[in-house]
Image (cartoon, grey):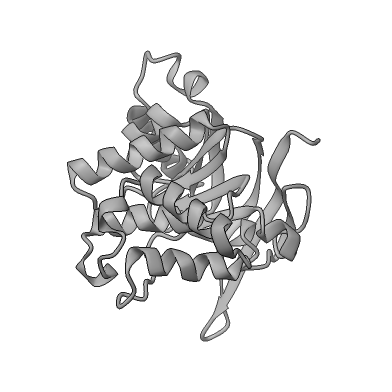
Amino acid sequence: MDDWIVEAVGLTKVYTSFPRKRVTTLDNVSFKVRRGETFGLLGPNGAGKTTSQKLFLGLLRPSSGSVRVLGGEPDDPEVRARVGFLPENPYFYTYLTGREFLEFCAALFDMRGAAKHQRIDELLMLVGMSSAAETQLRRYSKGMLQRIGIAQALINDPELIFLDEPTSGLDPLGHKQIGRIIKTLKAEGKTLFFNSHIMVDVEELCDQVAILHKGRLVASGTVGALTGDGRESLEDVFVRTIEEAEAIGR
């Protein structure tokens, strides 16, 4: 089986806005993610991180270049059945309880009977939401919604999980809880691809990182290689890389 689970080659995305203005959000970006890795995609606001994830999920099509996910096309239903996704700002049916929401998600994958109920119970326990399973989502805190959101991303036991800013806006407790869940998934051998502004998270959790600036790839490699095996923090590397890219007009 191919070790590369995500591949971007010359990935470019151009939008045309009124009045016929072309905006390039990704410009000839290439990188690969190996099976079992935790990969962090970094960049300032507007760098192209969320656009990248949408291309890998088949929610957008590239203007040029190519994308491969799990060895196939990202919009292939068989590929999508093996992928999980938590967007940065997920929408929830807030009149549902946590359990009812997961039952709805399970139905999308045609999960039924005892196997469905067992999977939901396992996920509620994993994300620490068993005690709130019968509470309506409208009563959940942001951290609780993030945790139930991760549970829905895992309902189909995916091989590859995309998380867009999973710890954004959380209080310290919620932040720590999400970090613990990601570590558990990492220990299980899942491939995780997440965007984040929080460098401490990326430095602690990721094997490989890539840094985007104005739609271009300006740095990539292992966390150890980029930080000089800890001689420099990833945050310092990020700031220096962006400043250098700005200075040369990239």
The answer to whether any part of residue 52 appears in the image is no
Out of 218 and 131, give the one closest to the viewer: 131
Q: Position of residue 113 (x, y in %)?
A: 57, 63
The residue drawn where x is 46% and y is 51% is 163
The residue drawn where x is 31% and y is 51% is 130
The answer to whether any part of residue 69 appears in the image is yes
Out of 114 and 72, give the one closest to the viewer: 114
Q: Within the image, what quadrant is residue 145 found in? A: bottom left
Out of 39 and 125, give the one closest to the viewer: 125
Q: Is residue 89 above or below residue 122?
A: below
**Residue sticking out furthest to the right:** 1
Q: Position of residue 154 (x, y in %)?
A: 51, 52
Q: Is residue 197 left or right of residue 241?
A: left
Q: Position of residue 137 (x, y in %)?
A: 28, 68
Q: Position of residue 196 (x, y in %)?
A: 39, 45
The residue drawn where x is 67% and y is 59% is 81
The residue drawn where x is 74% and y is 60% is 78
